Image (spheres, helix red, strand yellow):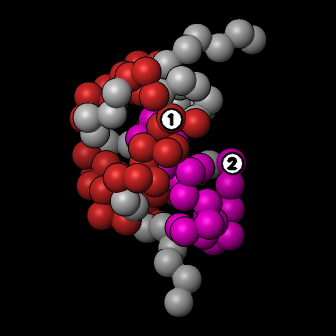
Amino acid sequence: MKRILPKDFDKYFWDTNTDKLSVDGNYSFIIERLLELGDLDELAWVNNNYSKEKISETLSKSRRISPKTGNFFSLYYKIPKDSLVACTKKHSI
């Protein structure tokens, strides 16, 4: 059975058809959006649906997560900041 996002999360994926998102297949995209834009309910959902390894992998590779969010979650998940190469660097436009 395909796991789906809760309907109240649609507001975080305004540019995407959430019916076509796969919780397992699109985990990186979903984690990025919910950590960057979500609140405590979304954080709890991420923690209940994804392993710390998948969350850490997403944080270490993401260029969509802001440096501020990356810094916070490196502390929250106890991930060394030096492993968050992509999201902790300022991006040029």
Residue situated furthest right in the rendering: 93
Secondary structure at numbered mark 1: helix
Q: Is residue 11 something that shows in the picture?
A: no
Mark 2, Cα crowd under 10 Å, few <14 / some 14-19 / many 20+, is few
Above or below: residue 32 compared with residue 75? below
Secondary structure at numbered mark 2: loop
Question: Where does the image place residue 14, in percent across and percent down from the top left?
Answer: 62, 49
Image quarter hosting the C terminus: top right
Looking at the image, which residue is at 25% across and 46% down? 40
The picture quadrant where one finds residue 35 is top left
Residue situated furthest bottom in the rendering: 1
Horizontal side of residue 34 vs 25, given as left or right: left
38 in the magenta segment? no
In this rendered view, identify the residue nearer to me: 3 or 25: 25
Tag 1 residue: 60
Looking at the image, which residue is at 48% across and 37% down? 59
Magenta highlight range: 15-36
The picture quadrant where one finds residue 64 is top right
In this rendered view, identify the residue nearer to me: 5 or 53: 53
Question: Where does the image place residue 28, in percent across and percent down from the top left?
Answer: 56, 51
Count of marks, rendered view = 2
Looking at the image, which residue is at 62% across and 29% down? 63
Looking at the image, which residue is at 31% across and 42% down? 39
Tag 2 residue: 15
| Amino acid on which disc 1 is placed | Ser
| Amino acid on which disc 2 is placed | Asp
Mark 1 vs mark 2: in front: 1
